[in-house]
Amino acid sequence: MSSWTRGSTSRRRTWRTWMPFGWKGAICPGNEETGRKRMKLASLAYMEEVKKRSNADPQYLELARGLNASYTLVLEPEPDKGVPDQIVVGFDNVDGKINEVWLGERPTDFTLSAPYGVWVDILRGKMGPTKAIASRKLRTKGPFLQLLQGANRIVRWVEILRTIPTEFEGEYAKYNLPGQ
């Protein structure tokens, strides 16, 4: 099913298609000043951009060298804030490079879950990923010690995500990221 919606902070229209596991494609009008198109957080297009930018970043690749693990990211709904549906995405690393990205659940080594707004706060820089994990705002399943040993890698990865022009859902749209 596809729908046209008007953003709460502007009068532009966005096109989106709901798939059983999240928004597919979902490339949205961008920042008029930069001319960049924003991508819906956790859409397939967004995850492909995550893969591209992560695999092109020498600092991330150095920190992730030897990493062979898979991850599920669960963005929990917040209906009262305009985020009605859970979004689940995943990816795997092979020797530090993101090998594959997907929408939906699969068995993975790690699962990271949080309300949608916590993910937005992490991407905005309002909360660091390690602080979110330590304070249990970002819940984890999997070998916790192994996850913490990669803290520098996770911090660098979030820095890469912040460079992606990102459109958030619902009340969080006011925090859309312009990207770099």
Image (tube, rainbow, N blue to C red):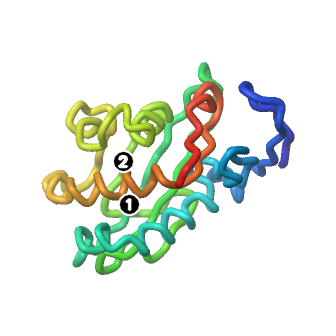
Q: In this view, does 56 lie to the left or right of 146?
A: right
Query: Mark 2 highlights which residue?
Result: 112
The earlier-in-sequence mark between 1 and 2 is 1
In the displayed structure, does residue 128 sit left or right of residue 114?
left
Label 1 sits on residue: 71
Q: Which amino acid does label 2 sit on?
A: Leu
- Real-space CA distance between mark 1 and mark 2, rounded to the nearest whole angstrom: 8 Å
Q: In which quarter of the image is residue 65?
A: bottom left
- What percent of the width, then of the height, locates residue 116? 50, 35
Q: From this viewpoint, which residue is outermost toward the front?
A: 33
- Residue 159 image position (x, y, % from top left): 37, 52
Of 83 and 160, which appears nearest the observer? Answer: 160
Closer to the camera, 53 or 51?
Answer: 53
Secondary structure found at label 2: strand
Q: What residue type is labelled 1?
A: Tyr
Label 1: state its secondary structure.
strand
Q: Is residue 99 above or below residue 177?
A: below
CB atoms of marks 1 and 2 within 8 Å: yes
Q: Residues within 10 Å of mark 2 (few under 14, many from 20)?
A: some
The structure residue drawn at horizontal position 64% and vertical position 52%, both measured from the top left corner, is 39
- At x 75%, y 47%, the residue is 29
